[in-house]
Amino acid sequence: MLFPTTDFAIFLAVVFALSWLLNQHRTAWKWCILAASYVFYGWWDPRLVSLLALVSTLAWASALWVERTNQDRARRRRTLVSVAVLLLPLAWFKYYGFFALNVANAFESLGLRPPLPLLQVLLPIGISFYTFMAISYVVDVSRYQIQVSRWLDVSLYLAFFPHLIAGPIVRSEELIPQIRRPRDAGRIDVSRASFLIVGGLFKKMVISSFLASQIVDPVFGAPNAHGGLEVLIAIYAYAIVIYADFSAYSDIAIGVALLLGFEFPANFDRPYTAVSLRDFWRRWHMTLSRWLRDYLYIPLGGSRHGEFRTAVNITITMLLGGLWHGAGWTFVAWGAFHGIGQVIGRWRARRAEGFGIVEPQSRWIVARKQLVTFNLVCLGWVFFRADSIASAFEILGRLGAAGTTALVTPLVLLTIAAMLGVQYLPADPTARLREGFGGLGPVLQGGALALCLFVITTLGPQGVTPFIYFRF
């Protein structure tokens, strides 16, 4: 079930009414929302519900098993076993085909018969997100950060439909306490929720769809048919497409959760204003960045064992972060690019510090860093978007080539510039708009929302494409 559809609008209206009617009846409320979440997830394929229920049960049972010992060594051993078990479904559905194909290619190059069968395994939607949340729950129990919860609470934590498919990746300590207590209907920030939902719909259905169809898909689909300028603008356009698409899902998810009385963490903070690749990951998909830091980078040793070990830990973290996004060498290359880029940036900063060089943070210095970082991020996006490593280099090889410029229209350039410009404004314009919207009366708010929806349906395409992060 896609957010920008009539089906979801009807679904949300029914769930909203039932949720607040059952708010004071906690057990009934939990079963109702869990059932609704399973309906939401099973809308694509009812068979997927059994997998989600299995992962939920494994997480709950694993946490119980971990909690039953107070010996640190046994606790760590049980945690590692539990994490490995939770990763098995993800490894099978997402990575078996990739692994088997590469093993087959390696064996065939040696004239040997491949040892593993090549199977087309259907990737369950959202499995990466709820697997990471299941792991964080077990690890948090192991670290004494949260107490073991009932099966129903854990199942609802993992299946709660606003974040189920593409995040944000909400921690157990953030969501489970909210699940356990009733919410106050009088404290619902309806204006903020509506603003987030409508703003997300606009970014997805108008901005992302327009740039994807007008220039990104044609250029990345057949780069040799396009000139260097079209390729360059398509690369910049894709940076906007993936930001508008993914931040739109996050905004809608946060807004829907707000309507049900829940607070989700923010997932984006003007990422294209970053002054380094490290800063970019503090602003982009922030819930994943924090997850990778707390459950992978720090357990590997973080920055506690010298510069070389720190560089290795950063690279491993970003490589696995890239592989989490997809089972393909393009995602491995993208992760390696960001990992090595962060290591180089850290080395340069340490080297300057060692020589006593303090770079003045003037407006122009910051602007230069932002420009360099944005272009590095866009370079990385080429590998993220391309179908193969060869295709990525083919696209990059077209830069500077002669060819048509028909796709580089004023409206395409204006859309890219506007989306970037909003991030660089000194004050967040969306916050001011949200405050102004909140100050309107109910009638004016309703009229404004109706007008926005009319504009979105008028400017948006026929039909709705899935969100980009659905395939991760």
Image: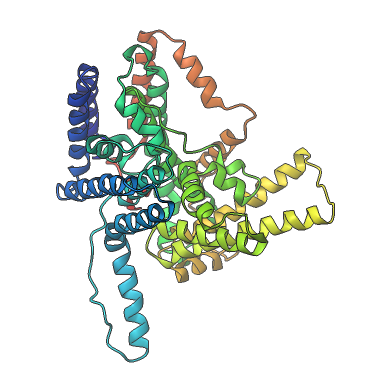
368 left or right, relative to 301: right
Tell which residue pokes out farthest to the bottom in this image.
Answer: 111
Q: Quadrant of residue 114?
A: bottom left
Q: Percent x, y for residue 138?
A: 35, 46
Query: Which one is in front, 412 or 268?
Result: 268
- Quadrant housing residue 174: top left
Q: In the image, 415: left or right of 153?
A: right
Residue drawn at 77 percent across, 41 percent down? 361
Q: Residue at x 38, y 14 (%)?
A: 187
> 365 or 419: nearer the eye?
365
Residue 9 spot, x, y in % from top left: 24, 29
- Viewer can see residue 228: no
Q: Nearer the viewer, residue 307 or 366?
A: 307
Residue under the point 18% across and 46% down: 49
Residue 307 at what x, y percent from top left? 67, 61
Apparent side of residue 252 relative to residue 315 in the rendered image (left or right): left
**Image quadrant in which the N terminus is located:** top left
Is 152 or 291 nearer to us in this picture?
152
